[in-house]
Image (cartoon, grey):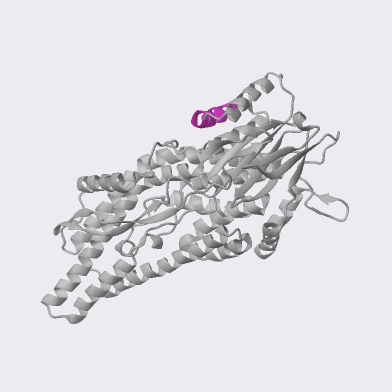
Amino acid sequence: MHLSLRSICFSAFIALFFIACDMHSAYINNAYDANNFQNTYKKTLAAQSDKTNALLWTMQEGYLDFAWGGGFYSIPTLDRAEGLFNERVKSGLLVGALENVGATLSNDLAIPYTGYFFEGSLLNLYKALAFVQVGDYADARVEFNRANDRQRMASDYYAKEIRKAQLKQLKDADKEASKNGETSVVAPSTRDKEIVGIINKNYSNIFGFEVYKNLINPSVSYLSGLFFLQVGDYSKSIDLLKEAYGITKAKTILDDMQLLEDRRLGKDSSHYTWIVIDDGDIVRKASLSIRPLLFTPTGLVGVSFVLPSMKGKDGKDAFLHYKVDSKNIEVITNLSSLFISEFKKQLPLIITRAMISTISKLAISQSMTIVGNNQSIPLLSIAGTISTLAFQASSTADTRSSTFLPNRTLVARIKNSDFNASDANITGDGRLLLKLHFSSMEDCTPSYFFASTTKDRPLTLDEAFKNFKALKQKERSKILLNNFKAKKSDTLTLCSKSDNIVYIRAKNNITNHFIIKGK
């Protein structure tokens, strides 16, 4: 055998080590679920020191900073997260994990987190919205374009790369088996049938009708289209709004397409306010234990291994129904469904790897035990037994994913002049969440409400962002920690003479809100 006893034991140890790391993830998620955003933030920062999971936790911090820290404060972190994500895509989102058998002998938690395209496009989307918030429309345009380009890349990428990566796994396993003088452990056609059987038997409960089969997030298309509508780039806006409407059939989007046409022709000079709600918690991964029959060098064998799955078809809503006064706020994206659609694209590769790993571990343990018994080497026999136990103990599914994201995105649009005499009340399941008060002053305060002051005048959000970006991480953290615990007013004041965008994040019956665009 070419694998040394030391390398086998080391692989088993590494596998157990990453199980402990997975428990650390659970601890962070527990803090987040308890709405303890300060503790969540601190633990998320600490988790980024682990290079294996640096991408995951940097993205998570970016999502947390945007939704609960106040929008533009997330830009530096989202920048770092995008840089890490781009490195993963450049090196191969799917192929780079199996360069040696040691990775196969441990478990998927030992592989650097590579992420999903929908996560990457959200990094750009939130960054775009944050740039709109501080009035930097040039950078906002760049980020909206990147968000759309990234998600359009996803479908083509999976179509080309999944099979390539799968065949690479099988080829590498075949080479390793030949080195050890063993029969090939895999046959592509046989494995394909086994994989289809496993998916049909164990995943039919979460793989239903695929709304997002092309992996397009309609929120990205819609909010991009809304931005281009408001800056007067009508030709670009209409294409994005059509894309979003084609997926969602949402009346709000149809109305915006009509508004675009009216504004293009100079028929509508009214001002409106758009409400964007990120609701609930995205579906999370779960472990699935299965016992299929697989072909091995010694024949058909019943094996057991663990795969990632999902905790159902949907995530968790904060509120079921939202309204602004009597008007329903519409769902335009179910992010959990999009996540499941992309997970399904990766699943054949995940199962292939699990098969190779299980059969390799089985062959190694059996060989050590047989050789030890035949040659009267008790230590080797014992090592075979120990490796079997260690491999069983280390059999853990990779359930890593971004857990700080919403389950759904909802939108609505109201006409400002309809609320000159009264506030617009936003409710969730009948509970008042936020009042929108419209000021009819001739000269409304600029959108970038004043965050702090200089000696001579108030400081705009744009200036506050530049100051924040120049701070060291420790000082940034202090500001964010204060933002996480700051109590927000239940009323936002908006200018009735401008278009406005209001963002609301809701989970576990609590909300945060801020103005994305307006005066």
Residue 329, percent from left and from top: 61, 36
Of residues 150 and 383, which is closer to you in this image? 383
Let me know if residue 153 is in the magenta part: no
Let me know if residue 246 is in the magenta part: yes
Q: Which residues are magenta?
A: 238-248
Answer with the quarter of the image where residue 411 lies.
top right
Q: Residue drawn 53% across and 61% down?
A: 30
Of residues 131 and 107, which is closer to you in this image? 107
**Residue positioned most to the front:** 430
Q: Quadrant of the N terminus?
A: bottom left
Q: Is residue 93 left or right of residue 248?
A: left
For the image, the number of numbered tags is: 0
Note whether residue 204 is visible: yes
**Residue positioned most to the right:** 456
Residue 315, percent from left and from top: 49, 48
**Residue positioned most to the left:** 374
Q: Is residue 296 left or right of residue 475?
A: left
167 is higher (above) or lower (below) than 518? below
Q: Residue drawn 57% across and 38% down?
A: 145
Q: Residue drawn 15% across and 73% down?
A: 371
Residue 334, percent from left and from top: 51, 41
Q: Residue drawn 20% across and 64% down?
A: 363
Main SS, magenta region, reads helix
Note whether residue 139 is visible: no
Q: Quadrant of the C terminus?
A: top right
Residue 355, percent from left and from top: 27, 55
